Image (cartoon, grey):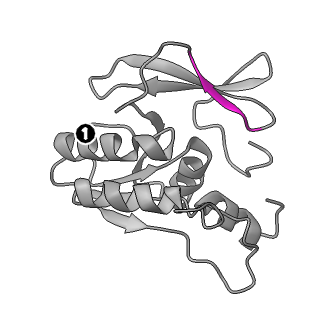
């Protein structure tokens, strides 16, 4: 959290790893995500991921603006930037469509923004590609980081951009 410049947003610590609840849209805990100090992420073995999410901030039945990020760290950055929004982390890019569609089903009139990663150094840019597909599938808006000309090409998400703009390491 220190390296990412974010608050804990209900994360717990267990044996040196951050522990995050993974919820299903029917309100049950589906898994836990563990984030190691080196950034490695794992879910409980055999648990459900598809269509599940990590509640970052503002998880409530009545909300008008919902931001869905790929990962939890990016979600924390976005929640701190927009405290009135509900922010959900989809766990990874491959889960964005399922989370976006389920979100639209539960909150049909909400403004939904898919805040995608920009994996511009990875062939096919999976973060942006899957975020774009999720936005289309859920009739949502798409937001991708807008890089200043002098931004390092290694930056990939809104957290990286916020840290870099603040003069922090990424």
The residue closer to the viewer here, 84 or 87, is 87
Q: Is residue 51 left or right of residue 165?
A: left
Residue at the location (20% across, 39% down)?
Answer: 106
Residue 170 sits inside the magenta stretch: no
Coordinates of residue 165 in the picture (x, y in percent): 72, 73
Q: Position of residue 20 (x, y in %)?
A: 57, 27
Tell me: 91 left or right of 161. Answer: left
- Does residue 95 lie above or below 146 as drawn? above
Quarter of the view holding residue 29: top left
The quadrant holding residue 17 is top right
Characterize the local packing of mark 1: few (<14), some (14-19) or many (20 or more) Cα atoms within 10 angstroms: some
Is residue 34 placed above or below 69 in the rendered structure?
above
Residue 122 placement (x, y as % from top left): 62, 60
User: From the viewer's perspective, is 29 left or right of 152?
Assistant: left
Q: Is residue 119 above or below residue 101?
A: below
User: Total marks drawn?
Assistant: 1
Q: Where, quadrant-wise, is the N terminus in this rendering? A: top right
- Residue at image coords 82%, 63%: 168
Which residue lies at the image location 32% right of the left edge and 22% below the top edge? 27
Rendering quarter of residue 36: top right
Give the camera-side residue of 87 and 146: 146
**Quadrant where the C terminus is found in the figure:** bottom right
Mark 1 lies on residue: 102
Q: Nearer the viewer, residue 75 or 91?
A: 91
Q: Residue at x 58, y 52 (%)?
A: 74
Which span of residues is magenta-colored?
39-44
Q: Indicate the secondary structure of the residue bearing disc 1.
A: helix
Q: Residue 2: give x, y in percent of width and height.
A: 79, 45
Classify residue 58 as left or right of residue 157. left
- Which residue reaches farthest top? 46
């Amino acid at each position: 959290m220190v390296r990412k410049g974010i608050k804990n947003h209900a994360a717990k610590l267990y044996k040196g790893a951050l522990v995050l609840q993974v919820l299903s849209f029917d309100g049950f805990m589906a898994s836990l995500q563990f984030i190691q100090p080196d950034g490695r992420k794992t879910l409980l073995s055999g648990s459900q991921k598809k269509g599940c999410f990590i509640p970052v901030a503002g998880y409530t039945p009545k909300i008008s603006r919902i931001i869905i990020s790929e990962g939890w760290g990016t979600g924390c950055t976005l929640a701190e930037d927009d405290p009135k929004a509900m922010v959900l982390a989809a766990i990874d890019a491959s889960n964005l469509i399922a989370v976006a569609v389920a979100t639209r089903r539960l909150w049909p009139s909400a403004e939904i923004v898919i805040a995608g990663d920009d994996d511009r150094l990875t062939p096919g840019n999976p973060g942006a590609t899957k975020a774009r597909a999720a936005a289309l599938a859920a009739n949502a808006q798409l937001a991708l980081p807008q890089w200043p000309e002098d931004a390092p090409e290694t930056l990939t998400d809104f957290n990286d951009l916020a840290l870099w703009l603040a003069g922090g390491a990424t």
